[in-house]
Amino acid sequence: MPEFRKDPLSDRWVIIAEGREGRPDEFQRTSSRRVASRCPFCAGHEEDTPRAIAVYDATHPALGLKSSKLTKTNQHVPAQPQQTEESACPTDHAAPANHPWLVRVVPNKYPAIDTAGDNTPVEFESFYEARPAIGVHEVIVESPRHVARFGQLTDDEARLLVLAYRDRIKALQQDSRLRYALAFKNTGPEAGASLEHGHSQIVATPLVPLEVQRELDAARRLYTEHGDCFFCRMVRAELEQDRRVVGQSPHFVAICPFASRMPFEMCMLPRKHLCHFELLGDETLFELAQFMHYVLKRLETIRPHAAYNYFIHTAPFDTLPLRHYHWHIEIYPRLTTTAGFEWGTGYFINPVPPEKAALALRSG
């Protein structure tokens, strides 16, 4: 029987309706390139992007660190980079072995916000409010090779990518106009990606995003009610029950949330309390990169070609250590379509119970 489930943090209800995946569908959905074009992110095409803000190469001193192995729920098998026919760039070849970069950070050529100006509100049409959309919009090119998915990155590329997330967030904190930076990745056209070559983005704004502020407010309320961090309580409960755990490492765990809005939705978070992602040290970051490699490879294995988004929620720049908040990474596969019922009610319908999703991801 379908059931309503409530997310304690967001107060959002979802409907778990197993079996709806079998509905008839007369529409054919395909993902294909519009045209074969020159990829601006491939090695040798650096002039197609703005000048790099930061460059990470194989000589980076942090690459000498060894990260911990994954334990308990899953055995980690390092994913080897693949070059498939689907992901092969039609005009470019694999980067030479001695290429001078593995990960590049560049300004977004088509930014959603502007770096110039200040955050002074202005009156706009009587009772409406507007202000300049200032901030920073950056792109992180994840490999000189034309790969499309996180699971195709080499271990070093994955490590340097996660290192770049941390470094850029820390650098953007120095701009007094900004209060928050969101690091995120869109994979596949259904998830909003406009280019196939694997890349992430960072957008820093003077405002704390509404979803993050709601999490902060709810986490503070739950901390007051229970005297403990909601995220810490969730980690302990999920590890004890082991029904929705996808995998774990010495410092991290991945679960399918109890009130998942989407099939195979996941949340990755540290097992011990930490509210600021950018405070992670190099060795722990590299363990996280290895763990992300494992978790996303599981998704890419059981749902080949699935589009997905992930993003890092961390505490705002101007906050001291928070006892009630816990940074985390949310992963949203785009396997269902948001339709009229969801938009009209706010209730998402998920046809795959998170317990079954976690089991499939562990076994995949």
Image (cartoon, rainbow, N blue to C red):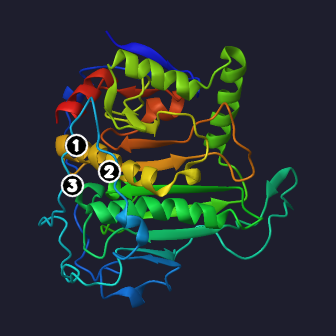
In terms of secondary structure, where does tag 2 sit?
A: helix
Q: Is residue 245 left or right of residue 162?
A: left
Q: Amino acid type of disc 1?
A: His
Q: Quadrant of residue 283?
A: bottom left
Mark 2 to mark 3 CA distance (whole Å): 31 Å
Secondary-structure class at tag 1: loop
Judged by depth in the image, the label closer to the viewer, 3 or 1, is 1
Provide the residue designation for mark 3: 30
Vertical comparison of 159 with 349: above or below = below
* Residue 269 located left or right of residue 206: left
Against 60, residue 336 (above or below) is above
Picture coordinates of residue 103 (x, y %)? Answer: 39, 72
How many other residues sit within 10 Å of disc 2, few (<14), some (14-19) or many (≥20)? many
Q: For the N terminus, which image quadrant? A: top left
Around disc 1, counting alpha carbons within 10 Å, would you say few (fewer than 14), some (14 to 19), or many (20 or more)?
A: some
Q: Position of residue 64 (x, y in %)?
A: 35, 65
Residue 76's tag is 1
